[in-house]
Amino acid sequence: MVVADEQFNLICLTVDVEWAHPDVLHDLVETISARGLEATFFSTHAGVQVPGHERALHPNFLRSGETMRRLGTAAAAMTDVDVYRHVIETTHSFCPEAVGVRGHRQFFDSTLLPIYKECGLRYDSSLFLPLAEGLAPVMKPHDILELPIYYIDHSDLNARYTDFDVAALGLDRPGLKVFDFHPNTVFINAATNGQYDASKTHYHDPNKLLAMRQSGAGARTLFIQLLDFIASQRRPTATLADVDRRWRAATVKQR
């Protein structure tokens, strides 16, 4: 069922935490909070502190990822479904209130859906449809609501969707607009994939990352322009958990 209602013509700020240093994450949280806005933070690890915002899950399903490496040789005997369940349960253990998920690298497999349901998750936000007009929540099997992604900063480094100009984001287009930003990409104001790759050597060193921040147009300048636009124009925003609640309430009324 599609809910055609202006209440879903929303801007949603989301962040993939990506194992960022606490100081780098704090910089992003404060930049959002200072404007009275809320965001959804997809958490990769324990100890992620984002007061006043939603936490969701950002599991890494790769067998080469940290969660699976910790299992050692036992991982070799696990099926893919075993891996999925272990990774979800592990990630959920340090973010128990989470009701949403976005796979690391936008990973998705249909066999994840019943596991999400079993673990009490309600929505997924892994499908990327760049700057597409008219996006809306869509129900998938096992009662998991898909909230598609409208913009990803890292993809902008490669595809040059906007040249980091807020006017190119099409904010007046109808539809749900889920924005996905990454702490390190924003912190260094990356404008190219090369700049981001060069920063990986100092991934957890905020002082060196700050020294690498470039002064021209980039992910950070666009991020701040977007936040200022939302705040000054009083555009309607919501966390993804709020969108999920509204959508489910609206579909009940339509039945």
Image: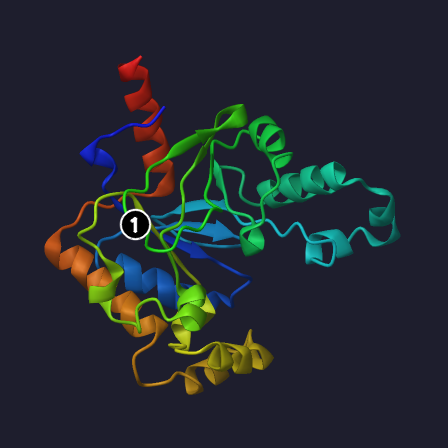
The foreground one among 140 and 242 is: 140
Where does the image place residue 107, in percent across and percent down from the top left? 58, 49
Task: Residue at 53%, 43% (x, y): give it.
Answer: 95
Where does the image place residue 40, in percent across and percent down from the top left? 39, 48
Badge 1, how many Cα within 10 Å: few under 14, some, many 20+? many
Where does the image place residue 83, in percent across and percent down from the top left? 73, 42
Count up the numbered dots.
1
Task: Residue at 41%, 53% (x, y): give it.
Answer: 50
Where does the image place residue 73, in percent across and percent down from the top left? 88, 52
Give the secondary structure at mark 1: loop
| Quadrant where the C terminus is found in the figure | top left
Task: Residue at 56%, 56% (x, y): give it.
Answer: 105
Q: Which residue lies furthest to the left in this view?
A: 233
Q: In this view, does 122 lie above or below 156?
A: above
Say whether residue 65 is left or right of residue 239.
Answer: right
Say whether residue 6 is left or right of residue 186.
Answer: left
| Quadrant where the N terminus is found in the figure | top left
The foreground one among 146 and 199 is: 146
Examine the rendering and report whether any part of residue 124 can be seen: yes
Q: Residue furthest top?
A: 255
Residue type, numbered disc 1 = Glu
Q: In this view, does 136 lie above or below 194?
A: above
The residue identified by callout 1 is 38
